[in-house]
Image (spheres, grey):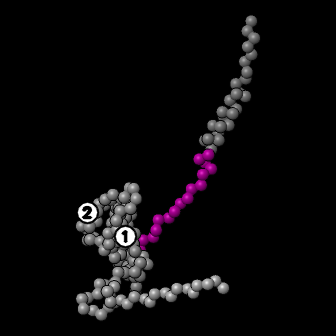
Amino acid sequence: MNNHTKEPAMPRLLPSIGLLFFALSAPLLADTLAIPAPEQPATTEAPAAPAAAPAAGYSVTLPGRGMTMDQVEARFGPPRERLPSVGDPPITRWVYDDFTVYFEYEYVINAVPNVGMPKPAAAPEAGSEEATPETTPEPPAAEPAPAGGD
């Protein structure tokens, strides 16, 4: 005799049917966001330029990431200042009038505009009367504080 009783199939299938129903109905509950295309002007004329273009004064062409030192110098000329390498890996900085370039080994890793940095002063011409380190008078030496603690 067989003592095995068969369980009804329906109670075992209910969790599976519920999960299937949930999985199939989820896409039906999603929202659709429709963004209209921008309107095109009816005329074929070029848009009028603004009266003043303040952004033009801030536009700087910068070297791209991955350029080599030779490529940067060929495109932008020699830098105003070449600072020595620092750290490991070596990071080198070249300063131009409008931007600064950072290199790792010989490759550009970043280039940033020199916003708010003063422009270098023009070198004084020979024979000018500007003060030089040789002609600048030294400030008077500070007098020592009197001895004795009152």
Residue 25 in the image: state x and y as whole percent: 62, 44
Magenta region, main secondary structure: loop
147 relative to 78, above or below: below
Q: Residue at x 26, y 88 (%)?
A: 125
Which residue is under mark 1?
A: 100
Q: Which mark is residue 70?
A: 2
Q: Which mark is residue 130?
A: none
The front one of 140 and 134 is 140
Residue 87 falls in which quadrant of the image? bottom left
Residue 75 in the image: state x and y as whole percent: 26, 68
Cα–Cα span, label 2 and label 1: 16 Å
Label 1 CA crowd tier, 10 Å (few <14, some 14–19, many 20+): some
Q: Amino acid at mark 2?
A: Asp
Label 2 CA crowd tier, 10 Å (few <14, some 14–19, many 20+): few
Residue 84 falls in which quadrant of the image? bottom left
33 relative to 148, above or below: above
Q: Is residue 77 magenta?
A: no
Q: Residue at x 74, y 16 (%)?
A: 5
Q: Residue at x 65, y 41 (%)?
A: 22
| Marks 2 and 1 close (CB-CB < 8 Å) | no
Q: Amino acid at mark 1?
A: Thr
Residue 60 in the image: state x and y as whole percent: 36, 73
Q: Residue at x 40, y 85 (%)?
A: 52
Nearer-N-terminus badge (2/1): 2
49 relative to 68, above or below: below
Q: Which image quadrant: the C terminus? A: bottom right
The front one of 10 and 79 is 79
Q: Which residues are magenta?
A: 26-41
Total labels drawn: 2
Q: Is residue 33 magenta?
A: yes
10 relative to 57, above or below: above
Residue 12 falls in which quadrant of the image? top right
